[in-house]
Image (tube, rainbow, N blue to C red):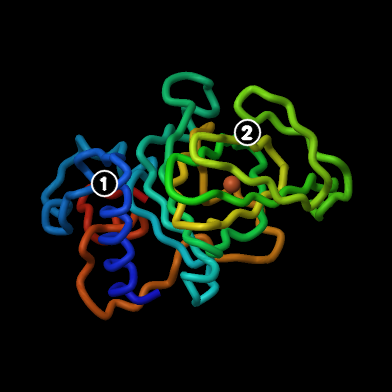
Protein backbone atom coordinates (compact mmCIF):
# COMPACT_ATOMS: atom_id res chain seq x y z
CA UNK A 1 0.00 0.00 0.00
CA UNK A 2 1.07 3.58 -0.56
CA UNK A 3 1.70 5.65 2.57
CA UNK A 4 -0.59 8.34 1.14
CA UNK A 5 -3.44 5.79 1.02
CA UNK A 6 -2.71 4.75 4.62
CA UNK A 7 -2.69 8.40 5.77
CA UNK A 8 -6.02 9.09 4.06
CA UNK A 9 -7.51 5.93 5.57
CA UNK A 10 -6.39 7.00 9.06
CA UNK A 11 -7.96 10.47 8.67
CA UNK A 12 -11.24 9.02 7.38
CA UNK A 13 -11.34 6.32 10.07
CA UNK A 14 -10.70 8.88 12.81
CA UNK A 15 -13.58 11.05 11.53
CA UNK A 16 -15.89 8.01 11.26
CA UNK A 17 -15.15 6.89 14.83
CA UNK A 18 -15.67 10.41 16.19
CA UNK A 19 -18.97 10.65 14.29
CA UNK A 20 -20.08 7.55 16.23
CA UNK A 21 -18.87 8.99 19.53
CA UNK A 22 -16.04 6.44 19.76
CA UNK A 23 -12.82 8.02 21.11
CA UNK A 24 -9.32 6.58 20.95
CA UNK A 25 -6.69 6.78 23.71
CA UNK A 26 -4.08 9.60 23.67
CA UNK A 27 -1.30 7.55 22.03
CA UNK A 28 -3.41 7.39 18.85
CA UNK A 29 -2.48 11.03 18.21
CA UNK A 30 1.25 10.99 18.89
CA UNK A 31 3.10 12.23 15.81
CA UNK A 32 6.14 10.41 14.41
CA UNK A 33 8.31 13.17 15.98
CA UNK A 34 6.64 12.65 19.38
CA UNK A 35 7.22 8.89 19.05
CA UNK A 36 10.91 9.43 18.39
CA UNK A 37 11.23 11.23 21.76
CA UNK A 38 9.38 8.62 23.85
CA UNK A 39 11.12 6.59 26.53
CA UNK A 40 10.75 3.12 28.02
CA UNK A 41 7.53 4.08 29.83
CA UNK A 42 5.60 3.49 26.58
CA UNK A 43 7.09 0.04 25.87
CA UNK A 44 3.74 -1.69 26.55
CA UNK A 45 2.23 0.08 23.54
CA UNK A 46 5.06 -1.10 21.31
CA UNK A 47 5.60 -4.60 22.70
CA UNK A 48 1.90 -5.50 22.66
CA UNK A 49 1.29 -3.92 19.23
CA UNK A 50 -1.25 -1.31 20.28
CA UNK A 51 -2.25 1.35 17.78
CA UNK A 52 -3.07 1.97 14.13
CA UNK A 53 -3.07 -1.06 11.87
CA UNK A 54 -4.24 -1.05 8.28
CA UNK A 55 -4.00 -4.06 6.02
CA UNK A 56 -4.88 -5.06 2.48
CA UNK A 57 -3.98 -8.70 3.32
CA UNK A 58 -1.50 -8.52 0.44
CA UNK A 59 -4.34 -8.05 -2.09
CA UNK A 60 -3.12 -4.74 -3.53
CA UNK A 61 -6.75 -3.55 -3.44
CA UNK A 62 -7.58 -2.27 0.06
CA UNK A 63 -11.16 -1.29 -0.82
CA UNK A 64 -11.95 -4.81 -1.99
CA UNK A 65 -9.91 -6.94 0.44
CA UNK A 66 -8.77 -5.00 3.47
CA UNK A 67 -9.43 -3.92 7.02
CA UNK A 68 -8.86 -0.91 9.22
CA UNK A 69 -7.92 -1.79 12.81
CA UNK A 70 -6.86 0.04 15.94
CA UNK A 71 -5.69 -2.08 18.88
CA UNK A 72 -6.76 -0.27 22.03
CA UNK A 73 -5.47 -2.81 24.57
CA UNK A 74 -3.67 -6.13 24.45
CA UNK A 75 -1.78 -8.40 26.81
CA UNK A 76 1.49 -10.20 26.10
CA UNK A 77 2.34 -13.80 25.34
CA UNK A 78 3.71 -13.94 28.91
CA UNK A 79 0.26 -12.93 30.24
CA UNK A 80 -1.24 -15.64 28.08
CA UNK A 81 1.27 -18.29 29.23
CA UNK A 82 0.88 -17.55 32.94
CA UNK A 83 -2.81 -16.68 32.89
CA UNK A 84 -1.91 -13.60 34.97
CA UNK A 85 -2.39 -9.91 34.24
CA UNK A 86 -3.77 -8.63 30.96
CA UNK A 87 -5.05 -11.81 29.31
CA UNK A 88 -7.45 -9.88 27.08
CA UNK A 89 -7.50 -7.49 24.13
CA UNK A 90 -9.79 -4.89 22.59
CA UNK A 91 -9.77 -3.52 19.06
CA UNK A 92 -11.92 -1.28 16.97
CA UNK A 93 -12.25 -2.16 13.29
CA UNK A 94 -13.92 -0.56 10.31
CA UNK A 95 -15.34 -2.72 7.51
CA UNK A 96 -16.59 -0.84 4.46
CA UNK A 97 -19.41 -2.04 2.21
CA UNK A 98 -18.21 -5.17 0.40
CA UNK A 99 -14.71 -4.79 1.86
CA UNK A 100 -13.75 -8.34 2.78
CA UNK A 101 -11.58 -9.65 5.58
CA UNK A 102 -10.70 -13.04 4.09
CA UNK A 103 -11.60 -16.42 5.55
CA UNK A 104 -9.46 -17.24 8.60
CA UNK A 105 -9.54 -18.69 12.09
CA UNK A 106 -7.44 -18.39 15.23
CA UNK A 107 -5.84 -21.35 16.99
CA UNK A 108 -5.85 -19.72 20.44
CA UNK A 109 -7.95 -16.55 20.39
CA UNK A 110 -11.67 -16.56 21.10
CA UNK A 111 -13.10 -13.25 19.97
CA UNK A 112 -16.38 -11.38 20.24
CA UNK A 113 -17.17 -9.35 17.15
CA UNK A 114 -19.57 -6.50 17.90
CA UNK A 115 -21.45 -4.17 15.57
CA UNK A 116 -21.02 -0.80 17.29
CA UNK A 117 -22.54 1.40 14.61
CA UNK A 118 -23.11 2.16 10.92
CA UNK A 119 -24.31 -0.52 8.51
CA UNK A 120 -24.79 -4.25 9.08
CA UNK A 121 -21.90 -6.69 9.37
CA UNK A 122 -22.07 -9.90 7.33
CA UNK A 123 -20.05 -12.85 8.67
CA UNK A 124 -19.68 -16.10 6.77
CA UNK A 125 -18.93 -19.13 8.94
CA UNK A 126 -17.50 -22.62 8.57
CA UNK A 127 -16.21 -25.11 11.07
CA UNK A 128 -12.69 -26.31 10.22
CA UNK A 129 -11.62 -29.88 9.53
CA UNK A 130 -8.63 -31.46 11.35
CA UNK A 131 -6.49 -30.56 8.30
CA UNK A 132 -7.68 -26.92 8.56
CA UNK A 133 -9.97 -26.87 5.54
CA UNK A 134 -13.68 -25.90 5.42
CA UNK A 135 -15.98 -28.43 7.09
CA UNK A 136 -19.57 -29.04 5.94
CA UNK A 137 -20.92 -29.48 9.47
CA UNK A 138 -23.42 -27.26 11.28
CA UNK A 139 -22.03 -24.43 13.37
CA UNK A 140 -23.21 -23.56 16.85
CA UNK A 141 -22.28 -20.16 18.25
CA UNK A 142 -23.30 -17.80 21.05
CA UNK A 143 -24.79 -14.49 19.96
CA UNK A 144 -25.30 -12.13 22.89
CA UNK A 145 -25.88 -15.06 25.20
CA UNK A 146 -28.23 -16.88 22.83
CA UNK A 147 -27.11 -20.19 21.30
CA UNK A 148 -27.69 -20.26 17.53
CA UNK A 149 -27.08 -22.94 14.90
CA UNK A 150 -26.17 -22.24 11.25
CA UNK A 151 -25.44 -24.27 8.14
CA UNK A 152 -21.86 -24.54 6.83
CA UNK A 153 -21.06 -21.42 4.83
CA UNK A 154 -24.11 -19.52 6.05
CA UNK A 155 -23.80 -15.73 6.30
CA UNK A 156 -24.85 -14.29 9.65
CA UNK A 157 -25.95 -10.64 9.78
CA UNK A 158 -25.13 -8.45 12.77
CA UNK A 159 -27.26 -5.35 13.22
CA UNK A 160 -25.99 -2.42 15.28
CA UNK A 161 -25.65 -3.53 18.90
CA UNK A 162 -25.45 -7.24 18.10
CA UNK A 163 -22.42 -9.45 18.60
CA UNK A 164 -21.16 -12.97 18.01
CA UNK A 165 -18.61 -15.05 19.88
CA UNK A 166 -16.19 -16.74 17.48
CA UNK A 167 -14.51 -19.71 19.15
CA UNK A 168 -11.07 -20.97 18.19
CA UNK A 169 -10.75 -22.83 14.86
CA UNK A 170 -14.08 -21.46 13.57
CA UNK A 171 -13.48 -20.03 10.09
CA UNK A 172 -14.89 -16.53 9.54
CA UNK A 173 -14.92 -13.97 6.76
CA UNK A 174 -16.70 -10.61 7.09
CA UNK A 175 -17.64 -7.41 5.26
CA UNK A 176 -19.94 -4.42 5.63
CA UNK A 177 -23.45 -4.22 4.19
CA UNK A 178 -25.56 -1.06 3.64
CA UNK A 179 -22.91 1.24 5.10
CA UNK A 180 -19.46 1.37 6.65
CA UNK A 181 -19.49 -0.58 9.94
CA UNK A 182 -17.81 0.37 13.21
CA UNK A 183 -16.84 -3.01 14.63
CA UNK A 184 -15.67 -3.80 18.15
CA UNK A 185 -13.50 -6.79 18.97
CA UNK A 186 -13.12 -8.06 22.53
CA UNK A 187 -10.90 -11.11 22.78
CA UNK A 188 -8.19 -13.11 24.44
CA UNK A 189 -4.64 -11.78 23.92
CA UNK A 190 -4.06 -11.05 20.25
CA UNK A 191 -0.97 -12.48 18.53
CA UNK A 192 -1.04 -11.53 14.86
CA UNK A 193 2.38 -13.04 14.24
CA UNK A 194 1.35 -16.60 15.14
CA UNK A 195 -2.39 -16.97 15.63
CA UNK A 196 -4.02 -16.33 12.24
CA UNK A 197 -4.78 -19.25 9.97
CA UNK A 198 -5.91 -17.90 6.57
CA UNK A 199 -7.59 -20.41 4.28
CA UNK A 200 -5.76 -18.87 1.30
CA UNK A 201 -2.28 -17.44 1.96
CA UNK A 202 -2.61 -13.76 2.93
CA UNK A 203 -0.21 -11.10 4.16
CA UNK A 204 -1.23 -9.64 7.50
CA UNK A 205 0.89 -6.46 7.37
CA UNK A 206 1.19 -4.40 4.18
CA UNK A 207 4.33 -3.61 2.21
CA UNK A 208 4.43 0.19 2.26
CA UNK A 209 5.51 2.45 -0.58
CA UNK A 210 6.72 5.63 1.15
CA UNK A 211 5.32 8.29 -1.20
CA UNK A 212 4.80 10.79 1.68
CA UNK A 213 5.69 10.95 5.41
CA UNK A 214 3.49 9.02 7.87
CA UNK A 215 0.67 11.04 9.49
CA UNK A 216 0.54 8.66 12.47
CA UNK A 217 2.60 5.49 12.91
CA UNK A 218 1.24 2.03 12.20
CA UNK A 219 2.22 -0.73 14.64
CA UNK A 220 4.66 -1.95 11.98
CA UNK A 221 6.44 1.44 12.03
CA UNK A 222 7.50 1.31 15.70
CA UNK A 223 10.87 -0.41 15.08
CA UNK A 224 11.87 2.47 12.80
CA UNK A 225 10.75 5.41 14.97
CA UNK A 226 10.82 4.24 18.60
CA UNK A 227 14.42 4.38 19.81
CA UNK A 228 13.89 1.99 22.76
CA UNK A 229 12.57 -0.75 20.50
CA UNK A 230 13.71 -4.22 21.47
CA UNK A 231 13.20 -6.87 18.82
FE1 LIG B 1 -10.68 -13.18 13.41
For residue 165, the mark is 2
Residue 224 falls left or right of residue 163: left
* Mark 2: secondary structure: strand
Mark 1, other Cα within 10 Å: few <14 / some 14–19 / many ≥20 = few
Residue 101 falls left or right of residue 2: right
Residue that extends furthest to the top in the rendered view of this protein = 84
Quarter of the image for the N terminus: give it.
bottom left
Q: Position of residue 157 (x, y in %)?
A: 63, 46
Of the two numbered discs 1 and 2 on the same chain, state the one appearing first in sequence: 1
Q: Position of residue 121 (x, y in %)?
A: 56, 49
Q: Residue at x 25, y 61 (%)?
A: 11
Q: What's the distance in space between the residues labelled 1 and 2, CA to CA?
A: 26 Å
Ligand 1 contact, mark 1 (Cβ < 8 Å): no
Residue that extends furthest to the front in the rendered view of this protein = 178
Q: Residue at x 41, y 35 (%)?
A: 74
Q: Residue at x 52, y 57 (%)?
A: 178
Mark 2, other Cα within 10 Å: few <14 / some 14–19 / many ≥20 = some
Ligand 1 contact, mark 2 (Cβ < 8 Å): no
- Identify the residue position indicated by label 1 in the image: 18
Q: Is residue 123 above or below residue 21?
A: below
Q: Is residue 211 above or below residue 171?
A: below
Q: Is residue 83 above or below residue 69?
A: above
- Say which of 3 and 68 sits in front: 68
Q: Residue at x 85, y 46 (%)?
A: 130
Q: Position of residue 71 (x, y in %)?
A: 39, 44
- Say which of 222 and 101 sits in front: 101
Residue 9 falls left or right of residue 170: left
* Mark 1: secondary structure: helix
For residue 109, the mark is none
- Say which of 209 and 4 sits in front: 4
Amino acid sequence: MKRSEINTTIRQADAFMKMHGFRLPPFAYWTPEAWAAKGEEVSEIVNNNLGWDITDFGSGDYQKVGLFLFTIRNGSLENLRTGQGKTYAEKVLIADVGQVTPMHFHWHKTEDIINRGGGRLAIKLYNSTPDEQLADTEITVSMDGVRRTFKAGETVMLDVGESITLPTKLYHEFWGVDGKVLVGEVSKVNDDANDNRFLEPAGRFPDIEEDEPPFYLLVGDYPKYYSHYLA
